Amino acid sequence: MRNRRTLFAIVVGLLAFATVRPALLSAKTGAEWSVQVSKVDAGKVSLSPSFQVALYENVFAELSKTRQFKYVLRDGQHGPDDAGDVLVLKTTVEKYTPGSETQRAVTTVTGATKLTVQAQLSMPDGKVLLERTVNGNVRFFGSNLRATHNLAHNIAKAIKKSSLPQRPVFAAAKAINTTPSDDIVVVEFR
């Protein structure tokens, strides 16, 4: 009898945890928005294609790790529920200083690879939410492409620290969510 009570308590606890946990996760992450990562614009800087691709892929990976967004989308990709809740992240390279792995290994004072970009996060209507100049570098050990990883990490950190606005609630969804179940809801489109 005691084993049944214990088993029943465990099952009830697991069920309660399973139903409460998704609400806690969405409240914790605030994953109301999705973000689309645009291709890296080299601007006036002569940046090798490998650096552009590495920066693009690292930004995509770092934003996915933050769990701040419902979906992290690539340039041109559409989410499963396109409802106007996709923010756009554009990165433009402002400054690039190529480094030397050999110099870094020998002296640890010279040979740093440095990247500076302008990161811009905007709403679907074009309104800019966040615009920051972000730096990334590799000073001591590591390949030159490590600067793109550090830069992507700094971009994700800047976005995570910023406060995103509440996602707009569309008229039909608002009407459905705010009325009692016995009322009839009429939504007119003009």
Image (cartoon, rainbow, N blue to C red):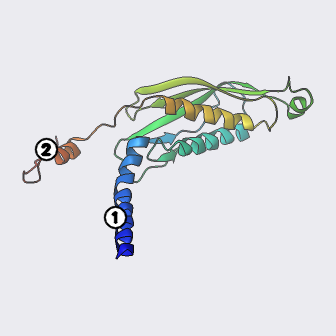
Q: Secondary structure at mark 1?
A: helix
The type of residue carrying mark 1 is Val
Query: Quick one: 63 or 12, which is closer to the camera?
Result: 12
Residue picked out by circle 1: 12
Q: Are marks 1 and 2 in contact (CB under 8 Å)?
A: no
Q: Earlier in the sequence, mark 1 or mark 2?
A: 1
Q: Is residue 3 visible?
A: yes
Circle 1 Cα neighbour tier, 10 Å, few/some/many (<14 / 14–19 / ≥20): few
The residue shown at (47%, 28%) is 162
Residue in view at x 80 percent, y 38 percent: 142
Query: Residue 60 location, x and y as percent?
Result: 58, 43
In this image, 163 relative to 110: left or right? left
Q: Camera-side residue: 177 or 2? A: 2
Which residue appears at 43% of the width and 29% of the height?
Answer: 163
Question: Residue 123 sits in which quadrant?
Answer: top left
The answer to which of 42 and 150 lies nearer the viewer is 150
* Quadrant assignment, res 43: top right
Element marked by disc 2? loop
- Does any portion of residue 81 appear in the rendered image? no
